[in-house]
Structures are given as structure tokens and as C-alpha cells.
Image (tube, rainbow, N blue to C red):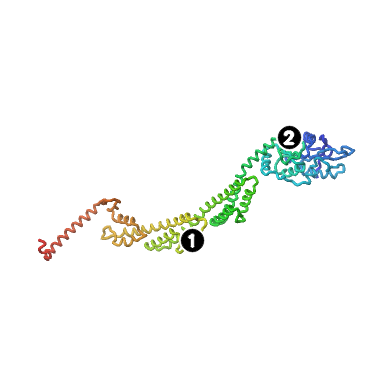
Amino acid sequence: MAVLSVVDSEGQLVDGPPTTLDAATVTAVTADGVELVVDPTAGWAMVYLKARTALVDRANRVAFYHAIATGDAPMDSLLSGLEMLRGDEQWDILTGDVHADVAREWAELDPSDLAWDRLARRAFREAVGDGERLTFAMADHADAVRAMKHFLGRVETSFAICSYGRTEALEEVGVVMVPDRSANFTAHDDETAEAIGRRRARLRAELPERLGAQFEATITTFIEDAEVPPVRLYETLERLRQALHDGTAVPEAAMDEIAAARTAIEDDPYLTDAERRTLIRRGIAHVVDAQGTVAERVETAHRHRLLERVDRAIAEAPTELEARYDRLTRLREQLLRGEAEGGPLGDVLAATAASSAVDPATARRIYAAGVRKVDAERRRVVDGLRDQVLTERVGGLPGLPQAFGDRYDAAGRLTRGDIERAIVDAFPGLRRAEPSSRQVSPSVTREDVLFLGGLVVLTSFAMVGVVAIVRETGLLAGVLP
């Protein structure tokens, strides 16, 4: 057990070893009649005692003393030393009819914040951290002891209980409690009132933002920790959104932190009803924003799955160009209509349409990606058909097969523009007429002139031969000379 140094009201040593605490402090505390001082950082504590001892007065008259403990955990040393002192036959420590029996009360009472205003407690901690010197009026010594036991160790500062206020001996003590039958934690001076009031007002102003940010953070943490597919996560968030909107329980145990954050908003005594509603709506909006992000991931997943199936369907299409084109056209029509039954894409389209994370506009975007892929393949097939047309020749001269229109101009295959381009490519001398009320004559090339000239010559020879034959046979006698 710790051995205490006991001094009289003038600071003179009465019992125990000389204290290591400086004499000026000892004298000041005893002279001012301070009931209790604890400085954990400096490592010392002093407590007021009412006692009799033959060490001072053989008549054993009542006198006032202070017991001093130094070192680490000085309050613990002080209490253990007092126990030893009570067992000493030379001392009679009085407990009844004592103005301030704080030593006994410290041993018997439980620590408590005395239901002090939460924002004021936070302001108190901030003020202590900022080095403010605070003085509070308290209801009595017992409440002062309970409060002191509660905050000792929670805030790093020195404490004192003194019925005479912040005396000269306590100028450097962080927190002084004055038992004077006031409401607990009433500011005892203007400096304390300003230090606590200013900080508390700021904390109140910041409260909605702090609770709102905390609410959003719990939602974000849940989303980041969720190890489920995007579609499942979207559906879970939708149930959460509905629960927050309806004020019902959150849908999953993993959302306990979200539920606690919502409860903190709903039960906070400082918020107004309007502020509570605003913060709940803020949480709902955060869920909706998160759903939007998840929905993008869902859309990407559905698009990826659809394009994989489209690639497979294209790979399985016939190689013969016309049959391949027909198969691709059917795929395209299924995508455009979103047909979820039958065909090589039916199950994929059905899953997309059934997803709660995919609205009609999103589904159309997903299907459009498949249409673009199919159209690219259809264009390659069209190019193949076009190449077939352009490689066919008639009599060594550029030309088109007579059955061109029947073979390649079926509905849904080549457009009129495709046919016109094929003709232009087959006959370089021709150009498509510009849309106008009158046609512009196409350019005539040297080859065209030679061809037509030869045709005229051949036709002339043929006509001469025909006339000679007719004259020889007399078929047109009387008509020809």
C-alpha cells in the first residue's frame, strides 16, 4: 500500500514521509481549503480530511488535514493510503458530520456524466483540449465526485473540487467544480459560459451534416462490402430504399449499421422534425444514386451476355450467303422486337426484360448493341453478294445478269441504293442521275463511243445484206426498186 504524506492546515508535515510536491502548492491548497485536487499528468493528488490524531494534539481534538499522494495513478495511491491510515491507531478519520467527505464518497459512488447535455459534453472535451480553464457550479460534493470520476481519464486535464470556487491555488487547474446547490454543470464564470456556449452552438449547427454524412457512409460501406452479383445488389438496394421510405425495418441483418444510423437521426433530441425528414430523404437519395451506379454495371453485364450469345448465333449461321443473310435478318428482328420466346436469343432477352435493374430504355440500349453487331455481319454478307454481282460478265463486256433483280433485290436484302451502287461499279461510264425534274445526260466515254460506232457499222452491214436477200427472192417486189 502507498504511504501518504499528511499535512496540517498550514502545510506542515504531520505524518508519513516528506512529499515530493513543491511546498508552495501544498501551502496554497491547504490554505484555500480545497477539498480535492487530482493532476494525473503531473502525478499528484491531495484530499481534505477531518480527523483526530495524538500526533498533533494529545487531547485528540478535531482538526483539518490534507493527505498527499504522488507518482503514477495518484488517485489510486491516495485511496489505498487512506485505507492504511484508517487502520492506524494513531488516526481517527471522521466520516459523519463532515462538510466534505470526498474521500469516502470517491470510494463509494459510481462515476456518472449526470445526464449532461450531449453537445455540451462534446463542447467540454473540445474546450479542455484547447487548453481552456473551466469552472462549473455543481449541486453538491457527491455529484461533483461522480462527474469527476467519470471524466478523469476521458479528458486529459487536472480536476479539483472546491467550495470556494477557483481560488488562487487552482489557477492552473483545468476543471474546477464548485458545490453550491446549483444545477449541475452551470457555468460558474463568463469565460466558462462563453467557451462551452460557443462550441455547443457550432456543434448543433454541424449536427445535421454530421448525421447525414454518417448515414450515407453506412450505406456506402454496405455496398462496398457486398459480395453479390450486380443484379442481386440492385434488388437489395431497392428493398432498402423502400424500407427507408416506409419507415420499416431494414431488409437484411448486414444492414445493422444503416439501421443504427437511421435510428440516430430519428431519436436525436436536438433535431427538428423537418431536419429528420430531410436527412432520411438524403439517405434515400444516396441509395437511389448507388442504384444508378449499380444499374450501369447491370447494363454492362446484360450487354456482355447478349453480345456473347449474338456472336455464337452468328458463328452458327449458314455459310451460304443468302441463307446466312436470312438467318441474320431473323436475329435482327428478334432483337428489335425484344422477343423473349424462342430463337437463339430468347432466354437472354427474357432475363434482361425480367431484371428489376433494367428499365425499357436500358433494355433498348442493350438490344441496340446486339442489332449493331448483327448489322455489321449483314453488311459483310451484302458485300459478298455484291461481289458476286460485279464479278459476273456477259460476252466479255461489263454487264449485269438478267436475273439480278430477282436474286438480290428481295425485300429485306439489298436496298435500291445497293443495286444502284452495283450498277455504277459494273458500268464505270454510268452515274446515277441527280434527283430533279429533268434528267442530266450521263458522260460518254471513249469506250462507249467506239462500242456504239462499231454497233452502227455492224448494223449497216446487216441492213445491206437483208436488202440484197429480199431483192433476190422478190419478196417485196413492187416495193423495192
Q: Is residue 339 left or right of residue 193?
A: left
Q: Is residue 320 left or right of residue 244?
A: left
Badge 2 density bin: few <14, some 14–19, many ≥20, Cα 10 Å: few
Q: Position of residue 443 (x, y in %)?
A: 26, 51
Q: Position of residue 56 (x, y in %)?
A: 87, 37
Q: Position of residue 201 (x, y in %)?
A: 64, 40
Judged from the image, the secondary structure of the residue bearing numbered disc 2 is loop
Name the residue at 11% across, 65% down.
474
Q: Nearer the viewer, mark 1 or mark 2?
A: 1
181 lies above or below 390: above
Q: Please tell me the numbered disc located at residue 310.
A: none
C-alpha gap between disc 1 and disc 2: 79 Å
Mark 2 — residue? 171
Q: Which corner quadrant holds the N terminus?
A: top right
* Residue type beneath disc 2: Glu
Badge 1 density bin: few <14, some 14–19, many ≥20, Cα 10 Å: some
313 lies above or below 150: below
Mark 1 — residue? 350
Judged from the image, the secondary structure of the residue bearing numbered disc 1 is helix
Q: Is 17 in front, or is 292?
A: 292
Residue 124 image-quadrant placement: top right
Q: Is residue 243 left or right of residue 69?
A: left
Q: Which corner quadrant holds the C terminus?
A: bottom left
Residue 45 image-quadrant placement: top right
Q: Is residue 375 left or right of residue 130?
A: left
For marks 1 and 2, the one nearer the N-term is 2
Q: Is residue 300 visible to the viewer in this orientation of the structure?
A: no
* Residue type beneath disc 1: Ala
Q: Position of residue 266 (x, y in %)?
A: 63, 49
Name the residue at 52% across, 52% down.
292
Q: Is 215 in front, or is 49?
A: 215
